[in-house]
Image (cartoon, grey):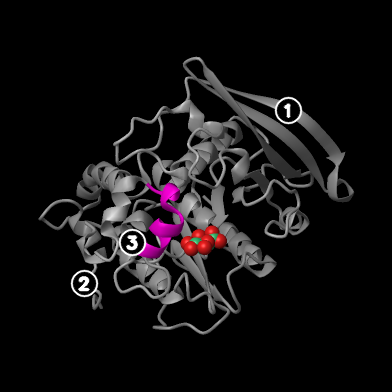
């Protein structure tokens, strides 16, 4: 099973292997700190001030099947303030719908990665924001939200951009949990690719997300790193060093020295629901390594008496769907993309596993 010499998540940062839920929960914080320190950088503290303002409301959205709202979140730290927009589409015909919080590449509603009408027809609300409205996808840490958190040079565990986008998702969640029209016990944070990594990291840090969905998140997302095909730590930290903290770079070509692997990230979501989607031809992300990660994280779910991934097939064929366990998985045919087909599978998973 463990041909890739993956570290045992049940060993955590200790030498002993945990056998109970209690021991795991005692260790969980240390593991979260480990990933913060070595990979993504520590999330900034909660904001000192936080407010939400409704900017726009459209009652007849999608032939009156839904209400569209545009909001502005304002966060304050010391003297500084920053605002970013986010969006809500809430079906009118459903009492307390479950909801997605989609960390999106763009701030379009709908968007080709976010088929709003189908989501509403499925009975779900969808909240979203465009990630670059929070802080740009580049190495400029004076831009947007990043400017709120001063950075001492030389610190190697400062939040990378993934941590900042995840932090912003948690602020939108602050808004969602304040709403009486949403089933706040059933909110799924979801993202694709770099934003799939972000959704997983937000889910690991914030237990209010009852569901966490990663679409084609690959390297430094759902896929285990040891023995991975396609993108490696050297590639990702050369092209996108600013997504991570500086410490992560020391593992270039030294994957085997990482004191964890990406299945630890998935395990931090236990016992909540997790869904991972791969695409058959997305070899840069490496579907096999994403699936293996789900299998390896499952042992933590088992400590809770839950089944993690239920997938009897070694290498599932394209369009195979495995929604039964607390970790769901499907592999779509085709290339790197977030499709309507994927959204339909996510909606089925939420309906099946609603809290
Ligand atoms: C790629 C990157 C991947 C993935 C992707 C994306 O260039 O190497 O890790 O995140 O971008 O976000 O579209």
Residue at disc 3, secondary structure: helix
Give the extent of the magenta segment: 233-244
The residue wearing badge 2 is: 5
Q: Is residue 221 visible?
A: no
Find residue 302 and report its horizontal and vertical position in percent.
Answer: 30, 61
Report the quarter where the N terminus lies: bottom left
Q: How far apart are marks 2 and 3 (CA)?
A: 13 Å
**Towards the viewer: 92 or 126:** 126
**Towards the viewer: 301 or 279:** 279
Residue at disc 1, secondary structure: strand
The residue wearing badge 3 is: 263
**Towards the viewer: 21 or 99:** 99
For the residue with label 1, is its CB less than 8 Å from the closest atom of ligand 1?
no
Check the image and report above or below for 259 versus 79.
Answer: below
Q: Which residue does the image show at 44% across and 43% down from the upper left?
A: 163
Q: In which quarter of the image is residue 8?
A: bottom left
Find residue 222 and report its horizontal and vertical position in percent.
Answer: 42, 62
Q: How many residues crowd around disc 1 within 10 Å: few (fewer than 14), some, or many (20 or more)?
A: few
Q: How far apart are marks 1 and 2 (CA)?
A: 51 Å
For marks 1 and 2, the one nearer the N-term is: 2
Magenta segment, prevailing SS (helix, strand or loop) = helix
Closest to the camera, between mark 2 and mark 3, is: 2
Drawn side of residue 313 relative to residue 16, left or right: right
Check the image and report above or below for 23 versus 289.
Answer: above
Q: Which residue does the image show at 33% across and 46% down from the upper left?
A: 246
């Amino acid at each position: 099973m463990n041909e890739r010499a993956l570290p045992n998540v049940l060993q955590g940062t200790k030498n002993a292997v945990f056998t109970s839920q209690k021991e795991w929960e005692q260790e969980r914080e240390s593991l979260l700190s480990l990933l913060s320190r070595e990979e993504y950088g520590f999330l900034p503290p909660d904001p000192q001030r936080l407010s939400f303002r409704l900017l726009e409301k459209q009652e007849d959205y999608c032939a009156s099947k839904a209400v569209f709202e545009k909001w502005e979140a304002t966060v304050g730290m010391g003297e500084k303030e920053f605002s970013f927009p986010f969006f809500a589409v809430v079906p009118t015909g459903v009492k307390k719908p479950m909801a997605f919080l989609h960390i999106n590449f763009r701030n379009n509603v709908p968007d080709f990665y976010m088929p709003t009408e189908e989501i509403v027809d499925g009975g779900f609300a969808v909240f979203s924001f465009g990630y670059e409205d929070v802080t740009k996808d580049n190495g400029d840490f004076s831009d947007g939200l990043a400017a709120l958190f001063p950075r001492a040079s030389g610190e190697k565990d400062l939040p990378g951009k993934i941590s900042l986008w995840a932090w912003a998702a948690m602020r939108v969640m602050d808004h969602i949990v304040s709403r009486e029209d949403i089933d706040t016990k059933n909110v799924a944070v979801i993202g694709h690719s770099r934003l799939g990594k972000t959704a997983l990291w937000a889910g690991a840090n914030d237990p209010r997300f009852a569901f966490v969905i990663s679409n084609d998140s690959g390297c430094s997302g759902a896929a285990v790193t040891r023995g991975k095909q396609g993108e490696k730590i050297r590639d990702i930290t050369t092209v996108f060093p600013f997504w991570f903290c500086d410490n992560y770079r020391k593992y270039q070509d030294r994957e085997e020295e990482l004191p964890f692997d990406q299945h630890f990230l998935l395990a931090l979501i236990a016992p909540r629901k997790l869904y991972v989607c791969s695409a058959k031809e997305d070899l840069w992300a490496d579907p096999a390594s994403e699936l293996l990660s789900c299998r390896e994280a499952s042992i933590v779910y088992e400590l809770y008496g839950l089944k993690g991934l239920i997938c009897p097939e070694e290498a599932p064929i394209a369009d195979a769907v495995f929604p039964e366990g607390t970790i769901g998985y499907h592999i779509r045919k085709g290339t790197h993309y977030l499709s309507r087909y994927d959204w339909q599978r996510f909606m089925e998973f939420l309906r099946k596993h609603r809290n």
